[in-house]
Image (cartoon, rainbow, N blue to C red):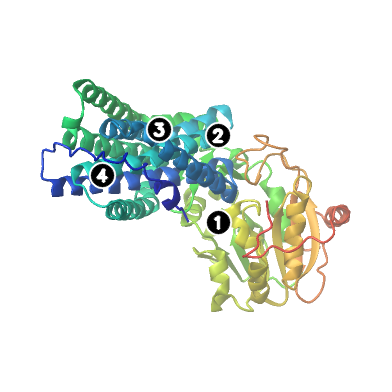
Amino acid sequence: MIDRSAPRGVLPAPEPRGVQPVPAALPVRPRTGRLLVLATVFVCAACGLVYELELLALGSYLIGDSVTQASVVLSVMVFAMGVGSLLAKRLRRRPAFGFGAIEAALALLGGFSAMTLYASFAWLGESRPALVAFSFAIGVLIGAEIPLLMVLIQRVRRQDAGGAVADLFAADYVGALVGGLAFPFLLLPMVGQLTGALLTGTVNAVAGGGLVLWLFRRDLSRRCRWLLIAANATVLAVLASATLLADDFERVARTAVYGGEVRVAVQTGVQELVLTGPATGSPRSLDLYLDGRLRVSGYDEYRYHEALVHPAMTGPHARVLVLGGGDGLAAREVLRYRDVASVTVVELDPGVVRLARTDPMLSALNARAYEDPRLGVVTQDAFHWLRGPAARDRFDVIVSDLPDPGITPSTKLYSQEFYGLAARALSPGGRLAVHAGPLTTRPRTYWTVESTLRAAGLLTTPYSAGGRLTGFGAGPDRTAGVTGSPPQDWGFVLAARERVPELRVDRDTPALHAVSTRALQDSARDAARTRPAGLPPSTLPHPRYS
């Protein structure tokens, strides 16, 4: 929850005793002028909250760990708003000019915040300093708005301070509500993050500049008036030019991040999908990114999916559930067994399923799994779907092919509550296979997953698969090696309710390229040597992944 009240509530010091604000010479009646000031407060508050949400969204998307990025952005911004409120005292003698200058600067900074953050990540590989700098600068400017508006509304019509504060805050909070709803439901899906920020800056400049240059124009000296006209015209021209070039900029920046063979780039209602590699040839050259994280690499995905799926298929496997895995690759491995009667894929993002069905390279990589009549798809959140009656006591095998547990939106899908629901969905003798993140580079996260499975009443066998060739599934980092060490393996946990599951592949298992019983058992012995003692499980109210 974004608390705007404290910093925006810092009011300017009262005028010295005996000095009253001089009424402004307005081109309209005071009642109309007051309504125009409140309408500007409404618009500026909406724009300010869009800037905040834009920084939060981009911080989580570019850097990862949305909890940390939200804490950084909000704490820095709230502190800066307090600083801005104090600095606004110096502008009280020329409140109209000060407010106009602040809105022009805010429109420029807020409008270009998303583009600058994306550029710093694309070409410099790091966006944290830019994120903190924009949070502070935008916070200072937002914090200076209300004190100056308090002076301006008192110049329109003198009223008691309590009534003026109530009116300003009411307009401010309602505007914040509109901005907070417009960002996820209007701006983000319709125009995207870059263009959305630029359009918001344009609205901000028009509202702030229009109020000062028309309603309070007689309060401005000739020199101040022309300065504000030139500043606002320049800001609007720059924002308009950037809006026209936003698509070209995004393509160039995307090439800098993903390389020169970006073939598909689409923003779904859930995430950004980027598919790289040639449109024809070997599917091994394909890379699929979800929200900037390398999720599938055609070079080594078979190592991951074979190790995830086949150990769980030793035993009854007529009915199989795949949680996540909308790319169809885990389903491909399951469908290699002729005695599988049904496969249910529960995928949150229908865009991933659509891409896996229709893209010629991705569908070739998943062996056209979606054309198999045994496969059915549910586009729903896996947690909510498991809570429903359709999942109970139904599946011989559950394959949890979900994003890395270190990614904050995935944390609930690695919780004790989630695994309790998964255990309930297993039929007697059923097995659950879980992707638990890299074991060698993130052992604490891996063993927290294992501890959480045990806390849910499941018996576990930890293991891993090596031979990783790329940064596939590398967690919060967009690509391997951007920050930290690239992962060298994949960690998995095989779990069951009745007894500790045996780690092996059956003799009648379809021919495998990277997995054998001996390799699996060797990896289990190696994994056991790294087990720390006393790791608590992760729960919904107390997530423990980092």
Q: Earlier in the sequence, mark 3 or mark 4?
A: 4
The amino acid at mark 4 is Thr
Residue where numbered disc 3 is placed: 109
Residue where numbered disc 2 is placed: 127
Name the residue located 25 percent from the left edge and 36 percent from the top edge.
Answer: 206
Q: In the image, is residue 81 above or below residue 385?
A: above
Measured as percent of width and height from the top left, residue 257 is found at: 54, 33
Q: In the image, is 362 to the left or to the right of 460?
A: left
Q: Mark 4: few, some, or many residues within 10 Å (few <14, many ≥20)? A: many
Question: Quadrant of residue 486 in the image?
Answer: top right
Q: Mark 2 or 3, which is nearer the eye?
A: 3
Q: Looking at the image, which is closer to me, 48 or 254?
A: 48
Give the CA separation, mark 4 to mark 1.
46 Å
Measured as percent of width and height from the top left, residue 155 is found at: 21, 41
Residue where numbered disc 4 is placed: 40
Measured as percent of width and height from the top left, residue 476 is found at: 62, 45
Give the CA separation, mark 2 to mark 4.
32 Å
The numbered dot on residue 326 is: 1
The amino acid at mark 2 is Ser
